[in-house]
Image (cartoon, coloured by chain):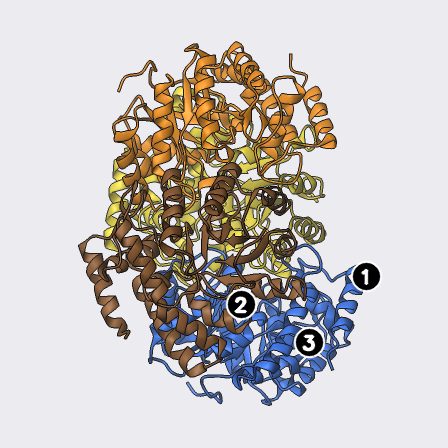
Chain colours: A brown, B orange, C yellow, D blue
């Protein structure tokens, strides 16, 4: 397996939202603007078809189109990571092949998420699927949606499977990260650790993590890149100031409305308010209506970002 | 919408396992034997692509093939219900269209199961999808896998949406069923209630439920049909004797191995042991090995069924 | 160990509310009226210091006073069961001794409920505590509050410990009951099974359970006794009519307000509305205010009980 | 309310284990050695009757004796914090009074932990209990045992109740801490934040937390004090080295055995191995047997602490 990534991968890799015109149609202009927006903000890669990209709500055809279009638009300027999670093994393999054919750089995979697997089953699953995956693969720990946490021992074993190059952890549990690192010791020095929750980006990087797959970087890529760099540089004054903004974003933009989907709705609405892309959401979710949209506008104004 | 079902639907409708030769190939002979086996056992319908049918592990192409083949093999002798659950709205609609085109009688739908919906989102989802579903639809309550329970109020509202004709409840919570029935009062007298857990079949029918979608009916269809009939007839001596066998099946066949998947593995292994169909399992699960298979054989022998 | 109970114990044993004037003072008149009310309603015993009795919110001194007063007021007319659950072993033993000294007939014990025990720890706990418990003991399965479910195998083993005579199951899971009964086979024929959730009383008795520890029997003891008797007699017409009332009670009286404590608040309010006892609740909960009390009144009026 | 604490309280405050000879008898010599051990290790206070102190398993009399003895032995050299958590309001008040009478400096309180409270009930509970608590109080967030998480808004409101001076957070969720800090803004600048999980101590202090209530500080107080100081000084080389030891401790000492109680058992066993105090555990738990004890010895030897 060859690829043009250097491991460990480092930096900010936004989990791109999927700009849509309707349930079956990409907002192509929005997608182009979004990609230019994040690349010009200095991100180190993009990740499509993650949770933030509403992957589970998109039809197979739309996923294939999104992979192809994104790879074309990015045009090798930064690495493209493609989510290939599916409850069916074969569909994940098919998505990974599509990603490879279109020149993507890596794929990202959760456990099967309908019928929960036990840890030995999960490890066996990874062992069985990897020979059919033509790109480097990141395991994706997202227990709130998959009901399954990769146990630290499973991660250690997975890291030794050929082709598995890293982990995106969205558990928000830094003790877990610490334990994995301790158990992994000096094995697999190139294994990449990326964190999902942006509120913990700086702590994660200070602890030796390699970067963040942070939803807010769709909106304000430069802010997250700056926080990543400040964390690398251990510039605490700057960390403190930038982290304050990040927490303000998550506290004011992702908590409007009453449901677990508030994060997705708030983020996509903010991207619409700032002119980046359409806020149409794939079923079963729906875009914010006027009152919530007004609150999003106010929250953005209150951020006082440059 | 027209169909040849009478509502409420009544009786035993086995959630068919999906006989497989490998991850992408149906065991066609096994499927035919399975269908003949359950129909000759007196079942009142069949349900494909449910949890027991490993729907979430099958590729889209395989699902389409299974729908077509099953409808052909059943050939209108009993109603065919088709699971159309998918985390993507469009794929559920596509599956339902395929079911209708092949002459199936109804479809069955869980909530989207990756990103959990709140109750108002769930009701809106049903309202949005129903106009695109060309067959009567049963909602499928399966909280252990979907992370979402249909609230009683949501069921009451759903029952008034055109096309929604019933519910399969796999929660195992009879209080929940009692509450829904009480709240529903005299509205929707034709709304069908089917129970998943076979251990509660007789109680459910005694309480006014219409029947069971019980995995064990793949294996011993006559036993479950008899228990259903005894429950309808309030023949307690017979209920007691038959229920004992059902509990013995679930206690001895579904609990081998250590994982949540024991039920699926045990059932498919038993169908192989009894010569009905192949026990190949779709990824990420795998068939029992020899020691577990021996225990399955012993458990079947100990049942002393006629 | 001798006692004047016959096992299996059978019938309706209300988990008495604890009538209070304030956080530290029993409503003695209310307690007397409550006891006379349920005994004249035909109950087969009373159970104090259960979840419905707010045991976890009462001080130790108050618990001792309640045990003594209740035993005196009941005066051997029906068996008195005493909850002795505590997170501390020694306090449970002390409560059991107090119960014995005052002439109570049995005690009831949950697992320790702060730091959850594993099943082997739970069984060892029962083995260690029983030699110090001077009365027959019922294990009390209440997973929603204790975070621990007695595994069926643990129940089977517990049933063979000297002094353990039965189980009160508040899990609401009838499959669980079925499995325990199947696994227990013909061992321990006198082991008593009582069910907590009143919505399942008739099904439980039809399945071979011995009776109910049902909160609503504080309020309408005769209704629950009648339903128990109709279930024993398999009089389905009567079961259907009475169960309807029971479901109406739980649906209309226990669901006012928004919290998990609605059941406790609604029940105690209804006992105040009907003149049985004070509705003061031990901290951290508080009695309903006027609007909720009005709804309780309306719900009682709508019941049209004789 | 007056006291000799300065707020925010800062540093390492070990949650002392409770040295026992049997279920009802303190290991007084062990307690004295433990107190001298941690004070000579430089800790900034001690906390008795926390989760690590097995508070929930101790009888009331033993708790009173422990409070009195500890205050006497500490003799004002460092602040003494006393856990007063109980499922009964009155018992918490009584414990707090005992703490005040014996010269303790503050108390620590979880939510009532049998019947879970909703957030408004929790806030009302704090408002009702504080006028009866004669010492400064820390709220204690321990959702795994209490089933209740203090919502950020509840913490903000609690911080404005007279007498509530800080929070011990054992959720392990640093995003939660970040959100509370953001929402609290400049109000309550003296409100103290202490973290439970020792694996996150340095990150927590780097983020502005005030210190740790870390179980491992019973064993190696100097290590945790040093890590706290290095974190304050932002000495990353030293942080990295010391944190490695802390993770090694939690990974090798707290994970022996199979149950949730492994942490408690491992810690108490290690204190016995190192000659500090008896490893007797209060029911329902029991000390490690020889094989586990050998593993504890090996794990301590492998630490190579000075």
| Mark 1 closeness class: few <14, some 14–19, many ≥20 residues within 10 Å | few
Q: Which residue is mark 2?
A: A209
**Distance Cα–Cα, label 2 vs label 3:** 29 Å
Are the residues under badges 2 and 3 in a single subunit?
no
Residue at 46% of width from left, 29% of height from top? B61
Helix, strand or loop status at disc 1: helix
Helix, strand or loop status at disc 2: loop
Q: Position of residue C196 (x, y in %)?
A: 49, 40
Q: Quadrant of residue B223?
A: top right
User: Please, which chain is the residue tagged with disc 1 on?
Assistant: D
Q: Position of residue C146 (x, y in %)?
A: 54, 52
Image marks 2 and 3: residues in contact by CB distance under 8 Å: no
**Distance Cα–Cα, label 2 vs label 1:** 39 Å
Depth check, front residue: C14 or D296: D296
| Mark 3 closeness class: few <14, some 14–19, many ≥20 residues within 10 Å | many
Q: Which mark is residue D219?
A: 3
Q: Is residue B116 above or below residue A267?
A: above
| Mark 2 closeness class: few <14, some 14–19, many ≥20 residues within 10 Å | many
């Amino acid at each position: 397996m060859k690829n043009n990534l250097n491991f460990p991968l480092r930096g900010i890799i936004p989990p791109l939202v999927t700009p849509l015109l309707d349930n079956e149609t990409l907002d192509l202009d929005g997608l182009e603007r979004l990609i230019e927006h994040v690349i010009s903000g200095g991100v180190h890669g993009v990740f499509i078809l993650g949770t933030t990209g509403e992957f589970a709500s998109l039809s197979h055809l739309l996923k294939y189109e999104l992979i192809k279009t994104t790879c074309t638009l990015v045009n090798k300027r930064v690495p493209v990571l493609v989510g290939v999670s599916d409850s069916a093994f074969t569909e994940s393999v098919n998505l990974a092949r599509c990603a490879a054919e279109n020149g993507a750089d890596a794929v990202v995979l959760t456990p099967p998420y309908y019928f929960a697997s036990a840890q030995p089953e999960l490890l066996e699953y990874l062992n069985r699927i990897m020979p059919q995956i033509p790109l480097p693969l990141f395991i994706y720990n997202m227990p709130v949606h998959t009901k399954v946490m990769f146990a630290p021992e499973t991660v250690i074993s997975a890291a030794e499977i050929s082709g598995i190059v890293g982990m995106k952890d969205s558990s928000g549990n830094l003790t877990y990260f610490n334990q994995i690192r301790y158990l992994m010791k000096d094995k697999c020095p190139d294994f990449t650790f990326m964190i999902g929750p942006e509120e913990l980006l700086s702590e994660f990087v200070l602890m030796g993590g390699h970067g963040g797959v942070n939803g807010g970087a769709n909106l304000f890529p430069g802010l997250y890149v700056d926080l990543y760099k400040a964390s690398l540089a251990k510039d605490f004054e700057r960390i403190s100031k930038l982290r304050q903004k990040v927490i303000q974003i998550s506290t004011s933009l992702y908590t409007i409305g009453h449901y677990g989907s508030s994060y997705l709705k708030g983020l996509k609405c903010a991207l619409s308010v700032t002119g980046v892309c359409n806020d149409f959401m794939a079923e079963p979710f729906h875009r914010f209506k006027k009152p919530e949209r007004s609150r999003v506008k106010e929250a953005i104004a209150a951020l006082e970002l440059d």
